[in-house]
Image (cartoon, grey):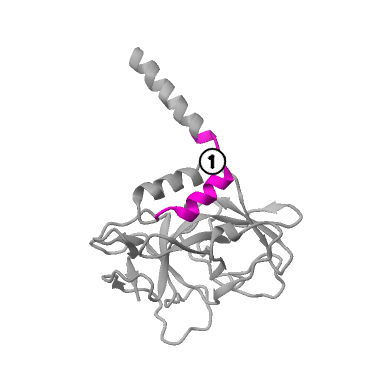
Amino acid sequence: MAYYDWSSRRADNEMAREMVPIPREDLVTMITTMNYNRDTDRGRLVNALERVVVPWIPVGSHRNGEIYRIAPGAFGLRADDNDPKTDRELVPDNVLGVNTNVQPTVPYRSRKANFSEVSTKSNESDDSEIGGFVFHQIGTLEFWGDEVENFRRFCVVIRFGRSGAANGVYLIYDFYPRDESGERDLRTDSDDWGQLPGDRSGQQFSVAKIADEITELRFGRTFELRDVLDYPVELVRTVKTPQDAIIRATIA
């Protein structure tokens, strides 16, 4: 009986902690200063991002006049191949990689010269900065129109390098929208992919940088899209190297 009471109190305490949101300033500090190669650091971040109540993070305004913010979360994007062939340890899919020199056939876009349709080579190199990068997911982009909307088209990620240090804040388009049953098995073939809502310019992109550091993001700031990729890209799983760095599982 005593063990049951102790176990019940422990479960209640753990649930209570999950209900308490991490302060926004602490969340931003964690995202800015953590080592993304460390399992424990990533575990703490996922725990903070996936709590029942999480404070949103301001982004700022775009030239289209919309105001944006981040709804925190660690699992908005999925890899094109969730089960790649590799002898290395797969990292959980809160951390993914993008191959910027791979252009899938769906959705259609004029093909870049010499780009593959899918990555075919196991990544045996410790250099994860060629033809793409790895990132940790931190949330979904929301905007204010007539009301706050979570349009689940773009996710916000933190790029990081071999050292595990944060190296830029990026938007990445979600090519696997959920269907009515909640499944997301089919890659979108829609012609209007990659467009920010309210942007009448018709600009389409799959990846774009919005800040060097997340501390730059705030209301009252107009952000520009930089390092824009205007073609569909491939997202891949990531693996650990013997040196405990994280690299893309497959490359072109």
Residue at the farthest bottom position: 113
Q: Position of residue 85 (x, y in %)?
A: 27, 64
- Please, what is the dominant secondary structure of the magenta stretch? helix
* 29 is within the stretch colored magenta: yes
Q: Say left or right for 242 vs 14.
A: left
Extreme residue in the top direction: 1
- Magenta residues? 18-35
Circle 1 residue:
22
- Residue 100, above or below 19: below
Q: Residue drawn at (35%, 13%), measured in percent from left and top?
A: 2
Left or right of 58, for residue 17? left
User: Residue drawn 42% across and 45% down?
Assistant: 44
Q: Nearer the viewer, residue 90 or 189?
A: 90
Q: Is residue 17 above or below residue 55?
A: above
Q: Is residue 250 magenta-colored? A: no
Pick the quarter of the image with the N terminus: top left
Q: Is residue 88 left or right of residue 169?
A: left
Closer to the camera in the image, 91 or 128: 128
Instruction: Specify the quadrant that holds the C terminus.
Output: bottom left
Observer able to see residue 171: no
Q: Position of residue 17 (x, y in %)?
A: 49, 32
Is 220 drawn above or below residue 1 in the view shown?
A: below
- Quarter of the image for residue 83 reads bottom left
Can you give x and y, in whole percent of width and height, for residue 139 in the image?
A: 54, 54
